[in-house]
Image (spheres, rainbow, N blue to C red):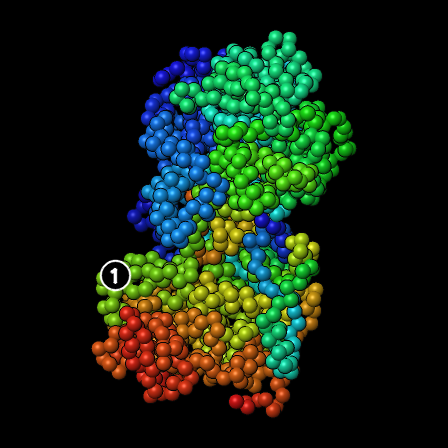
Amino acid sequence: MKIMNCPLNGPRNISEFVWGGEVRTMPDPNGCTTEEWADYVFLENNTAGIVREWWCHVPTSFWFIAERNTVTDEIIRTYPAGEVFKTRVDFAPRPKTQEGTR
Amino acid sequence: MAAVNALQPTDRLRRSFVYRILQANGAVFEEINGGAVAMRFGASTESEVAKARRLGLADLSPLPRTGFKGVGTVDWLTAQGLTIGPDSNRAYRQSGGELAARLAPTEVLLLDSLSGDGALIERLNGAWGWSTETPRKPIGYPMPRADSHCWFAVTGEQAPAMFAKICGVDLRPNKFPEGAIAQTSVARINGIVIRQATALPSYYLLADSASAEYLWHGVMDAMLEFDGGPVGLAAVRELSSGV
Amino acid sequence: MNGTGVNGAGMNGAGRLPAPAGRLIDRNRTVQFNFEGRSYEGFAGDTIASALAANDVWLLSRSFKYRRPRGVLTMAGQDANTLVQIGPEPNVLADRRSIGNGISVLGQNYDGSLENDRGRWVESFGRFMPVGFYYKAFYKPKSAWKFWERVIRNKAGLGKVDVDAHHGYFDKQYLFADVAVIGGGPAGLSAALQAAEAGAEVILVDDTPELGGSLNYARFDGSGEMARTVGGELRAAVALTPNIRVLSAATCTGWFSDNWLPVIAGDRLYKMRAKAVVMATGSIEQPMVFRNNDLPGVMLGSAAQRLISFYGVKPGRRAVVATANADGYGVALDLIEAGVAVQAVVDLRPSVAPSPLAKAIFNRGIRVVTGHTIAEAMPSAARDRVAGVLVAEITGEGTFAQAAETIECDLVCMSVGYTPAGQLLHHAGTKFFYDRASHMFQPGVVPAHVFPAGSVNGTYNLDTVIAEGRHAGWAAAKDAGLAAGAEPAMSGEKGAAGQTHPWPIFPHPKGKDFVDFDEDLQVKDLINGLADGYDNIELLKRYSTVGMGPSQGRHSAVAAVRITAKETGRDIAGMSVTTQRPPYMPEKFGHLAGRVFEPERHTAMHHRHIEAGAKMMVAGLWYRPAFYGPSENREQAIREEVLSVRENVGLIDVSTLGGLDIRGADAAEFLNRLYTFAYAKQPVGRSRYVLMTEQAGAIIDDGVACRFHDEHFYVTATTGGVDAVYRQMLFWNAQWRLDVDVANVTAAYAGVNIAGPRSREVLQKLCDDVDLSAEAFPYMGVRTGTVAGVPVRLLRVGFVGELGYEIHIPASQGEVVWDALMAAGQPFSIRPFGVEAQRVLRLEKGHIIVGQDTDGLTHPYEADMAWAISRKKPFFVGGRSIEIQAEKGLTRKLVGFTLDDPQAPVPEECHLVIRGGAIVGRVTSAVRSPSVGKVIGLAYVAPDQAEVGQSFDIRIGGGRMIEARVVPIPFYDPENKRQEM
């Protein structure tokens, strides 16, 4: 069983963690095309090499980011999400024309 | 057998999550802070202390505890007079014997001393409130720790070996110093393990209160090979005295 | 028979030897056991095989395919020859399992009795069973397999499974080490000592009862003193080292990522984690291949040495030793000292390499025949033991002269070479390469944190082995982060050359020259497999099954490679043995399962339900009352519980509902982003429905959000969904960084719903600090207050469609409030109701249950929940996806239905909605409603049949079609007057 180093709890058996998918940027939900949105929701890059992924330490529900080599299965680095997500995210209001058009 | 008019957990509003198991094991209860605590299990205090030194499981669930969480928590608690160090997953002992267990940079679990007088806990719970100033100063939020988690003590020489049967973190005294905290999986449920400041290995184990009966039975089963068993608060106090 | 083992050397020359032979047995403690129905005695410390051998019993089991008699091969638990059955336990290694008083042991793979197997006919049929036999023989015509399968299955398999066997108590334990050392031979002992000296916490795992490895049975000098001295010193040093923990009679069965090492000892599986691991697993002596090389009495030289040294058992009366290295001469010396008449040493080599051991044999005048091999072993009259060998001159690689000398013997020892016991290194990813100089496979690149030492690493000279062990221990301690001190010297000849013969394989025209004893594979089977086109060792393995039996190729893999190389004309130096995978030794399911950990969650009122006769059901980990009363009264109980709520007052435990405290300046904004509805303007003191969708727009949870403060929402979630909801909330806010704190307080609150027209009257009796009147505390209002002296959160919600209050109570006081409500309700004939009644009640109101009335694809428009979507918000999770799907148009829609035919049966969940022979939807919930008086339900139908009044067809059990009609929901109290009373 692999060991993963949780930035909060230290090295633990990988069975204490769940995977949360690749770290990706959400396209503008009100401005992007349907295809761009579908790509974001459904498609994983499945990179052979170093990926940045979300992992959660289940006993503490602590989310963090891990850099992992999918070829060698090495965990290169783990760090708190705050290193990447530093500022508050806000969404632009919906364009007036779309409001309640259905 | 307890005397006919002896205190029973059902005489009080707050009840331990395992009180039926304690009763079935012949516990003698005493009132502490509005709850009935299993003080001993009929045996002589000496033999129960001996058991606790070998391997004992005690239910401390009725003892006072609380928690605070969110941005500003540690600053606010410090302003309330608590001493909390910078490291997470470490329990900081307070002047009254209480433990401030820092579970995360912005989360603290507070466990009363084994006297259970609850003074600090009550004061903190009473001091917290929604501020009316704007912008509101961040002080964190209270957590219902007395109800979300059961509180057990696992005591004695064999405790690390017993834990190794149900928990994947190395809890041996030389690897898990006094005050160390492991938030991990214990018998397949989430648990908080805190090493007590005692000469013998002794740990607090807190876990989902709804799983308390399951956990009690699971720990008891793991204890069998070491001849461990239930012990009361009196024995746990005895082990912790002089610290 | 009985008791011959007790009196030292037994009759007929077999039996016990005097001490110091028999280091593992306690001659003062006799143990009685049964084998094949006969009673025997052995000593404490004996294995089944050694105790039987001491009683001159050599036939232990029969082979898997041809039912050939089999006996001791390795005495090391490495082979499948000695698999026996003890009561319900099959496949016990007789040369490893200790005898216990009174155990009953049986051989395996025979019909009738071990000595007279009625299935022996199979062997004479053997020439009709070529490799690939099953593939070839039983599939033409295709239906033939149906017949043959039963015959074959009856014959196949190892041992007998007793399906009624009692479950054993197995468990698991974690172990932690700085340095783990696998193998307690000279390399492992040295490594452990060196690592411990460096301050490492060392765990030394050895699969024998006593540390020492080959030092405990093999001979390193003419007198045998060296092994005794070195072994004694190393063992004593280890015993005096407090930071070495020894696990004896323990097997490390695998290597997994980050030095995760399963170790089986008795009924316990240790899960060991080491920072660094020293692999000192040694090597495995290899058998020769010649005709009848599987007869009982033909064994490895090291097996005979183990019998003598460990158990004080004389392995035979007259022996022939076949060898190609110095160790064979050590075997001969041991045999002579044990009183065995060594008839000849047959050395495969053209001449004997000088060694102290060979010299000692020559000095004793033992006959040595060089350049010869055993061409064939001959069975005794009873065909159950070797009676002699034919010795012939070697004429080329694997060939021998016709002329042969017969030598009578009851013991044949094979000492022709070794292969590294590299299974664990294999697991760790190390490849093995053929080394021409030593004719052995040697480990290639070893991964980080793993350090091989000793003969697994091709090192045989004892001094060098010890130095290499020291060095590996040092390197491992250093790797584990300890100040290991100066690097120990690493020098000396490895001594691998001359240990192993390049071709100890002598095919016989009449066959029975076994390469693989487990699978009864002869040389020609492999050759035929290669001829069939499976000319790669990995393919040949799968086709012929070589190396796939219980011993996993430990004695056959190298020979199979040699044969493959020769037959395909390839250079063996470019080949490798087949990949080894965990486990190294068989593991029981009990070991893997361990103790059963099945977490259960009980609500604060759990025992009250049981006391009230509730039939409990499982919801995730929770236990909930399904209904109250005996199972046979199920329908009636549910009906009465429903009516009690509709007409009077009922009480249900809703503690399992999830509870989340969402607090902070951005609490409303946070809910806006996570749920479909709008929360910014929700007043304090009110609750609002919450519906959660995932990124693709599918519904994943629902509940209510109660606003207790401008900055505090208490949000409920479904029983099964709350943990995922909580995790999602934290996941999103790890990115959004809103000023909000999320706490999962599910377990902290017990909950009850007191519902029914008289619920207010009951609650009134226990609550004097909240005005419960409809005006002061209307439907969808929320309050905090005190009930029965307990501080609670009160929610007026309408899941069951009656006046009612959800009371959320600190869990430690849940039982108190339950008792108080039941007592206060007694004058009103209050009744507890269970999940089943609640399902009926909510269906009558048309409320969906997420996961029952929705599936993994259901979006809110399909579920007819457009009302729950706010389209003005900039964003919510799933919003864009729902919009895209809605624009594409619906493919199905959830509708309420009734059955017009009052006699029609109740459809079941997942009964299909059929139109024109095609499936267009399915029933998700249906019940005969006590309140409405007819069958009601929810179903997905095609969008164009979803208008009220339209009818559709449901195919129910037995294929019958019934007609349903779309009706408006709620079915009951359509104007929702009752819940707002």
C140 to C624, vertically: above or below? above
Residue C542, image x and y in percent?
Answer: 53, 45
- Dot 1: what SS? helix
Q: Quick check: can you spot residue B92?
A: no
- Give the residue displayed 37% in from the left and 46% down from the top: C148
- Give the residue displayed 32% in from the left and 31% down from the top: C112
Seen from the viewer's position, the closer of residues C180 and C563 is C563
Seen from the viewer's position, the closer of residues C194 and C663 is C194
- Give the residue displayed 56% in from the left and 75% down from the top: C877
C499 to A51, vertically: above or below? above
Tally the numbered discs: 1
Tell me where residue A8 sits by quadrant: bottom right
Neighbours of disc 1 within 10 Å: few (<14), some (14-19), many (20+): few
Q: What residue occupies the far front of the structure in this picture? A: C402
| Type of the residue with mark 1 | Ser
B128 to C772, vertically: above or below? above
Seen from the viewer's position, the closer of residues C331 and C964 is C331
- Give the residue displayed 59% in from the left and 10% down from the top: C366
Residue on which the image places disc 1: C631
Assign the C terminus of chain C to one quadrant of the image.
Answer: bottom left
Does C710 sit left or right of C865 as displayed?
A: right
C98 to C917, vertically: above or below? above
Residue C669, image x and y in percent?
Answer: 58, 78
Seen from the viewer's position, the closer of residues C824 and C619 is C619
